[in-house]
Every structure is written in structure tokens, then in C-alpha cells.
Amino acid sequence: MSAHQPRLQTIAQLIPPLTYNLHKGDCGRIAAIGGCEEYTGAPYFAASTTLRLGADLAYVVCEKDAASVIKAYSPDLIVNPYLRSTTNTDRSLEEIDEKLKPLLSKMHAVSVGSGLGNDLKIRESAKRAIQHARSLSIPVVLDADSLAIVAESPEIIHGYTNAILTPNAPEFDRLAKSLGVEPKKDEAPEIAAQRVASALDGVTVVRKGKSDIITDGVRLFICDEVGGLRRCGGQGDILSGAIATFLAWGERYKAGAWKHTAEIHENEFPMLAAFAACTITRHASFLAYEEYGRATQSSSVLEQVDIAFDNKFEEILKTVKSPKL
């Protein structure tokens, strides 16, 4: 199976063109599910990335002790302290379900895992969120600690082609081992990634690394956009938010929210969304490193997300027709 890169002109069809006829929510409602007492920055990065790219509403669903901290980071985020933890058991799992279901039903996409942590009760809450998202056919991005949920219970997303996993190298190896498809000696990473995606029956896998390998087991993209040299924590959360944004736009595209000049089949959305997000995140990392060098932090990368988006898509978007809203 040969790898190739999709045309950015094709991906641009998924991006909502801005007009005065748009209403709040037309450009996407997205939830970042994660955040515990120890890790509050991760869901902030994921959710804030969606706003930087142009989504209208960004929600964070987190553990109670993380909520006030995340609210203090930004007034633009809608923070819901619905995840149950070992130290906060004032809500039963059934009560959490009653909170999550109506919230998720409004979303165009969700990301799960940023700052989730190792608390078993938080993970159980997140697992239910994944199940609800799947039952509602909502696209979902799984990163970081949510990958442990998949490793323990792969059936939760097996065969769900609206799911994207974004493991780094160690996370990929653990996931592959849990699925019984450990990388073989001297096996090309592209082949290993394809075998994991195939074992999950069509789920898209983004194996992050020097180049990002994107595959659903059948198709294969390689994103080798130049990135920065810093590997500070949080860049994966930015990627998760970016993927969720393009997935949300795919849902709006599918609903016919705007006119387009090329027809994209919905089974192409996950691969295209992943490639677009990898391209933007890597370019934002490059721009941040060019400015800050060794002092680059993920907050530096977040500052560059909108600039990276403009660099890649601004000229292309001038050819996109106005929406029919």
C-alpha cells in the first residue's frame, strides 16, 4: 500500500466559509473530555485549539477539582465538572450519564483523554462518554489516557469508523500489544500502523512521530510537514483539538451547511481531518520554535495555531463559495 498526501484544496472544502448569514454553532460545537486535579492544562489546550481554528463553541468536561482552574484560564470555554473521581463521588455514574447524554447530543465532535489521569472512576466516566458519543454517531478523537481505555476494552471503538486514535510511540506499542499485533522486528512503522487500524476494523490511527503516519488500514497518508524541535507536553492535546475541529466541520459539510465545489464522501472525513490537523499542528510547532527556540512551550504553539491555519489555507479559501445558510 503506497502512501500519499491529500490535496489541501480538497480539505479546504470542509472548512466553513465565514459570512454574515452564519449563526452561533454553525462552525462547530466541540467538547474536550478530560482534566483532573493534576492535569488542567491539557483539556484547555485541546478546547482552545478548536476556538483558534474557528469553531464557535468549546466545552470542557472535566473532574470537579479541575473545573475552577480551567475556568480561570479562559472565559471563552464552557466548563462542565461532570467526571466522577475517587475523591469526588457526590454523583453516581447514572447521574453522570444524565448530565453527559444531553450535552453530547449537541456536539459535532468530541476529543477524549487530555489530562484524564489514572483515576479509575474518572476513566469510567470517560468510558461512558465514549459509549454515548458512539451511540449518537458523533466523531471522537482518542488521545493520551483514553488510549488505555481502548487497550483494556477495544470493543468500545472497534469498527467505529468515526473514531481517530492519536498514540505516540510508547502508547502505540502498548496499544498494539493489547490487540495482539505487536510490531515485528524491522517492520516499517507504516505497516505496523496499518495492522493496528485493521485490528480495530477501520478506525483511523495517527501514529505520531518524526513523520505522522495516518491510516485506516486501507488508505495511508504520511504527514511530513516540518515541525519544531521541542517536544514539550501539550502538543498532542493541540493536535486532538485540531482533529476534532475538522471532524466537526465534516459533520456540518455532510449536513449541507455550505456549498462546495468538490464532493467528498463522508468515509474520507477522518483521514482528511487527521492530515489537516497534523499539518497545522506541526507548522504551528515550527513557527513557535522559530520564535522561542528552547524556551518553546505548548502555550507558544497554541499562539501560532491560527497563523499556521492561515498560512496553509488562507489563499485556498478565497476560492470557496459562500454557504447557503
Image (tube, grey):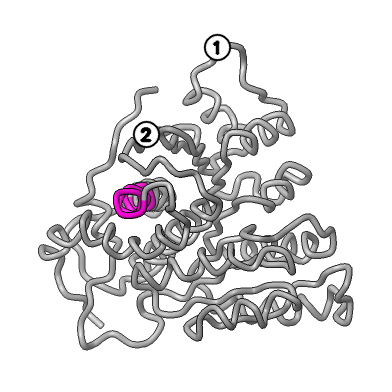
Q: Give, as a three-letter code, the residue at label 1.
A: Asp
- What x and y, as percent, mark residue 315? 12, 59
On the question of residue 91 being in view, the answer is yes
Q: Residue at x 21, y 88 (%)?
A: 20
- Quadrant occupied by the N terminus: top left
Q: Residue at x 64, y 68 (%)?
A: 40
- Quadrant occupied by the C terminus: bottom left
Residue 259 versus residue 165: which sits nearer the camera?
A: 165
Residue at numbered disc 2: 222
Mark 1 neighbour density, 10 Å: few (under 14) some (14–19) many (20 or more): few
Range of magenta residues: 280-292
- What x and y, as percent, mark residue 316? 15, 58
Q: Residue furthest top?
A: 186
Residue at numbered disc 1: 186
Q: Secondary structure at mark 2?
A: strand
Tell me where residue 13 sits by quadrant: bottom left
Sooner in the amino-acid sequence: mark 1 or mark 2? 1
- What x and y, as percent, mark residue 255? 37, 70
Q: Is residue 290 magenta?
A: yes
- What secondary structure is the magenta-colored segment mainly? helix
Q: Secondary structure at mark 1?
A: loop
Q: Give, as a three-letter code, the residue at label 2.
A: Ile
